[in-house]
Image (cartoon, rainbow, N blue to C red):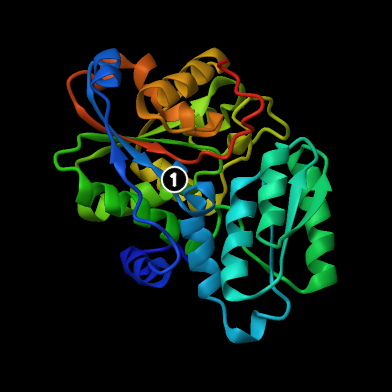
Amino acid sequence: MAIPGWEDVLAAHERINPYVLRTPVLASPLLDKLAGAELFFKCEALQRAGAFKARGAVNAVFALPVSQLANGVATHSSGNHGTCLSYAANRRGMPCTVVMPRTAPQAKKDAVRAFGGKVVECEPSTSSREAVFAEVVAASGAEFVHPYNDARVIAGQATCSRELIEQVDGLVAVVAPIGGGGMVSGTCLTLSNLSPKVRVYAAEPEQADDAYRSFKAGYIIADDAPTTIADGLKVPLKDLTWHFVQRYVTDVLTVSEAEIIDAMGLIWKHLKVTAEPSSAVALATVLKNRDIFAGQRVGVILTGGNVNLDKLPWQ
């Protein structure tokens, strides 16, 4: 699949506009004080289906020809992409099947089903996920919409930072979580076209640091089954996302599990937004690296809010 360009982002913006929200940007003087910087939180936790991935999923689904409606779409996902693809398929009136690790949060499985999607469980490893998914596609003829290694998806995710640049003047840096790299790639795609001087930092758990190691090594290094509370960031980079990461990302920064949990609590306390662990990695990274961000205007992308409310880890 071809690498997406700026014209693809513009087309995605028009295509998804009726089905996604222009999410708000929030700020907190107390979080600014903790960080020693001016922080602007792009709240994709308030997006349709609770995550930024609604953007890419809607763009991919509504770009499909009418001839694909009967067979539907399918994907493998630790949660948010599956939920968002199910939402998008529901809006277009087509079936959706999502292969998910059996260990994925129940809230995310329930969310897929709430939009009419079918969940097929696999073991919590990349190899199991891909094997089970291959069986699903062979049986159904569904169109594969990859969670991140898909030009349609990356172009959709790029609309998030396009909004952020319109909403906040004078940003010096943007920090976004990284797993497979869809959001970071979309951020790079937008900023390299609209504001090339704005630095992009990728935020990652120490216990799932394959993007960090890949960035330092200069080639993709993949973990088969990393263990982290940030369940949405357990997947490896792929060729399309690696294209953007190696060319446009300033650095990949990592944080501990405790730092992620603390950031979740701070987001709730000061912004009154529920952020899932994968989302909180971005704030945790800014707080850990005051020397990098001190005195700057920094965009922080809160990527999702689909968390089990019965088991909030900071409580």
Rendered image quadrant of residue 307: top right
Quadrant assignment for the N terminus: bottom right
In the image shown, does 162 or 252 lie closer to the viewer?
162
| Whether residue 78 can be seen here | no
Q: In percent of the image, x 78 and y 56: which residue is there?
A: 133
**Residue 263 falls in which quadrant of the image?**
top left
Quadrant of image for the C terminus: top right
Say which residue appears at 34% left-offset and 43% top-offset.
248
> In the displayed structure, would residue 178 be above or below residue 6?
above
- Residue at x 27%, y 47% (from the top left corner): 164
Residue 309: x percent and y percent? 61, 31
Callout 1 secondary element: helix
Taking the view exactly as shown, the residue that stands out farthest to the bottom is 67
Left or right of 298: which side holds 295? left
In the figure, is residue 142 to the left or right of 283? right
Residue in the picture at 21% in, 52% down:
166
Q: What is the x, y in percent for residue 51?
A: 50, 47
Q: In this view, does 105 lie to the left or right of 148?
A: right
**Number of callouts:** 1
Residue 313 in picture, x, y percent from top left: 60, 19
Horizontally, residue 146 falls left or right of residue 105, namely left
Q: Is residue 40 above or below residue 31?
A: below
Task: Please name whichever residue, 151 or 45, is drawn nearer the observer in this view of the structure.
Answer: 45
Q: Is residue 260 visible?
A: yes
Label 1 crowding class (10 Å Cα cut-off): few <14, some 14-19, many 20+?
A: many
Q: Where is residue 103 in the image (x, y as percent from the top left)?
A: 77, 35
Q: Farthest residue in the left direction?
A: 170
Amino acid type for the residue under numbered disc 1? Leu
Report the residue marked by disc 1: 46
